[in-house]
Image (cartoon, coloured by chain):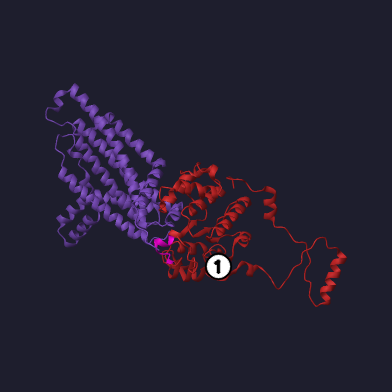
């Protein structure tokens, strides 16, 4: 199917969701007049504290919940329609699958559920399993998989029908840094393949590394949205990095700045990120136990 | 985007998964082993025949075990397998695919009906083996026992087993209907057994209200009669072991009656489940 890039992958307008709580039916607003647009081909991060409405928004997108007000469209199709889910792959938070199936049987099952023909299905299943790095564990029962392997097989079932939009709800929840880095790599590869990715994560470092744009939600409302580069970059505050700058040189440099009326607010050695050090020391694992 | 048609393949896949899940559950094995042990060991209960002919007693005992354990299995398995999908979030992954909610409900129902069918088939096979063995022994030792007829007719046993299965399928459809809107497994189990009790006793209520003669009573009994299936109609085991002919007309009418209730309950379950928030 050819991708129409003029149609946004996701378009939410005034999306509102109320839940009735308790016997008296008190309304709890989980999502409040949310307007959001995710263009095709982007990696979009949906951020927010627990209870901010991220997962509810995703369920509304998938037609698992009905909006109280507003519209929710996936590639121009109302999310209330089954048809809208044909182009969507979904990895739920803490995925639970049929544990008595092997990884291969599970992906095969979801492939057939998505309407893939029997002919060529085995090859497609093998392809996505290899892509997520689970070939050697493909014939083991899902019940024996580690958390990282469950996320990977979850990714495989989400991708088996080659959807244009991939929704990942906390794809690295409970996964160790090596597994999280592997999943980040897979997400970047999805973008390279032209997929749109909408993801939530509490690992803000991961979001910063992989996402093109982010939206931050709090108490159901959108409080900030923009390109990651624009949000975290400070073009008005240039920084200089150099090797082995002595105390005298540093003092001279400060004087040079002062002579030009430019305050030199801080001089410090850059810090390495702990996850980078961890990954350098532990190293990536070829397959499986992530 | 072109429409996603209703797919019998997806229904079959969901049904297949339901059967696999049921087969893995200890509950299914427990009820099956218990029922098989009772039917297989029925000869040790022959002294409790209350004067009925022996083969008639054996058949009644076997179908009693099938009805009792089958109903318990059906209600418990329906609630457990439905809520298992919701609580373990497998329904979330499944319904996030291009799957109609109707396909999910029909798949679940067909899977549960197949489980009940396997249960009835195994018990019927064992019961037939017990009946035939005992009949051969009686014919050898006490030939005059069959002077007035009373031989077991295999077709009658199969017809009775078919109706027992149909009754369990109706019960599964009603329990699934409750599960489609219920928030808890316990409520579903309680309501499932309530349907079973009402279905077995509704003819008594009908008779009582009809005798009472009040319009409101007649209306209420009529309502119960329409809403709940009369499970007594599914019991033709009384005709077994007495040499009577199989009441095929009755079997056909009850089959249509049962299938009608299954269709109505499943349709209502689909309507209810369509709006359920997962």
Q: Quadrant of residue B278?
A: bottom left
Furthest residue toward left: B148
Residue A104 shows in this picture = yes
* Colour for chain A in the figure: red
User: What is the tally of numbered marks visible in this picture?
Assistant: 1
Could you tell me residue A91's position as x and y percent?
50, 55
B20 is higher (above) or lower (below) than A253: above
**In which quadrant of the rendered view does residue A232 lie?**
bottom right
How busy is the neighbourhood of tag 1: few (under 14 within 10 Å), some, or many (20 plus)? Answer: many
Residue A167 shown left or right of residue B140 in the figure: right
The part of the chain drawn in magenta is A77-85
Name the residue tied to disc 1: A217
Q: Position of residue B236 (x, y in %)?
A: 20, 41
Q: Is residue A80 magenta?
A: yes
Q: Chain of mark 1?
A: A
- Residue that lies at the very extreme toward the bottom in this rendered image: A261
Q: Is residue A17 left or right of residue A278?
A: left
Residue A191 image point, x, y percent:
56, 59
Q: Nearer the viewer, residue B16 or A209?
A: A209
B79 or A187, nearer to the observer = A187
As for residue B106 lying within the magenta part, the answer is no
The N terminus of chain B sits in image quarter: bottom left
Examine the rendering and report whether any part of residue B189 can be seen: no
Expressed as whole percent of the image width and height from the top left, the position of residue A195 reads 52, 60
Residue at 16%, 43% in the rendered image = B248
Residue B163, picture quadrant? top left
Residue at the right extreme, as displayed = A248
Q: Colour of chain B?
A: purple
Look at the numbered disc 1 and give the secondary structure of its residue. Answer: strand
């Amino acid at each position: 199917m050819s991708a129409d890039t003029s149609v946004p992958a996701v378009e939410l307008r005034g999306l509102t969701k109320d839940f009735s709580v308790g016997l008296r039916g008190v309304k709890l607003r989980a999502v409040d007049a949310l307007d959001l647009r995710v263009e095709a081909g982007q990696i979009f991060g949906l951020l927010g504290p627990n209870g901010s409405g991220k997962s509810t928004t995703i369920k509304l997108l998938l037609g698992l919940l009905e909006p109280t007000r507003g519209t929710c469209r996936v590639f121009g199709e109302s999310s209330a329609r089954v048809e809208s889910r044909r182009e969507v792959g979904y990895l739920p938070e803490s995925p639970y699958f049929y544990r008595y199936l092997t990884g291969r049987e599970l992906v095969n099952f979801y492939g057939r559920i998505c309407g893939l023909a029997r002919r060529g299905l085995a090859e497609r299943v093998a392809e996505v399993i290899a892509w997520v790095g689970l070939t050697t564990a493909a014939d083991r029962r899902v019940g024996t998989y580690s958390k990282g392997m469950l996320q990977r097989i979850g990714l495989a079932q989400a991708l088996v029908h080659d959807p244009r939009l991939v929704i990942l709800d906390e794809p690295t929840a409970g996964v160790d840094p090596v597994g999280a880095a592997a999943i980040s790599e897979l997400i970047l590869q999805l973008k390279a393949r032209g997929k749109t990715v909408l993801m939530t994560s509490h690992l803000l470092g991961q979001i910063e590394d992989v996402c093109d744009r982010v939206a931050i939600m709090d108490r159901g409302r959108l409080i900030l949205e923009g390109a990651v580069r624009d949000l975290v970059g400070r073009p008005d505050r240039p920084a200089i990095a150099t090797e082995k700058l002595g105390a005298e040189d540093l003092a001279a440099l400060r004087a040079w700045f002062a002579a030009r009326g430019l305050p030199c607010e801080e001089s410090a050695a850059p810090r390495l990120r702990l996850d980078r050090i961890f990954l350098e020391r532990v190293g990536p694992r070829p397959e499986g136990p992530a | 985007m072109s429409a996603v048609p209703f797919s019998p393949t997806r229904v079959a896949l969901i049904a297949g998964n339901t059967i696999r899940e049921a087969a893995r559950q200890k509950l299914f094995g427990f009820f099956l082993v218990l029922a098989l042990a009772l039917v297989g060991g029925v000869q040790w209960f022959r002294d409790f025949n209350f004067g009925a002919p022996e083969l008639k007693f054996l058949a009644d005992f076997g179908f009693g075990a099938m009805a009792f354990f089958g109903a318990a299995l059906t209600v418990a398995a329906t609630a457990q397998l439905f809520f298992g999908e919701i609580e373990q979030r497998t329904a979330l992954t499944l319904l996030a695919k291009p799957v109609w909610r109707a396909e999910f409900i029909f798949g679940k129902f067909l899977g549960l009906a197949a489980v009940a069918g396997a249960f009835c088939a195994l018990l019927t096979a064992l019961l037939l083996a017990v009946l035939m063995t005992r009949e051969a022994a009686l014919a050898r030792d006490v030939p005059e026992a069959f002077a007035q007829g009373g031989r077991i007719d295999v077709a009658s046993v199969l017809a009775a087993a078919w109706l027992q299965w149909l009754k369990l399928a109706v019960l599964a459809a009603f329990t699934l209907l409750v599960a489609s809107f219920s928030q808890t497994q316990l409520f579903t189990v309680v309501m499932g057994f309530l349907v079973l009790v009402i279905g077995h006793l509704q003819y008594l209520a009908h008779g009582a209200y009809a005798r009472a003669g009040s319009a409101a009573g007649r209306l209420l009994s009529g309502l119960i009669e329409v809403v709940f299936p009369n499970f007594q109609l599914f019991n033709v085991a009384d005709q077994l072991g007495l040499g009577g002919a199989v009441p095929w007309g009755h079997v056909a009418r009850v089959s249509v009656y049962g299938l009608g209730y299954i269709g109505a309950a499943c349709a209502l379950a689909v309507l209810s489940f369509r709006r359920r928030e997962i």
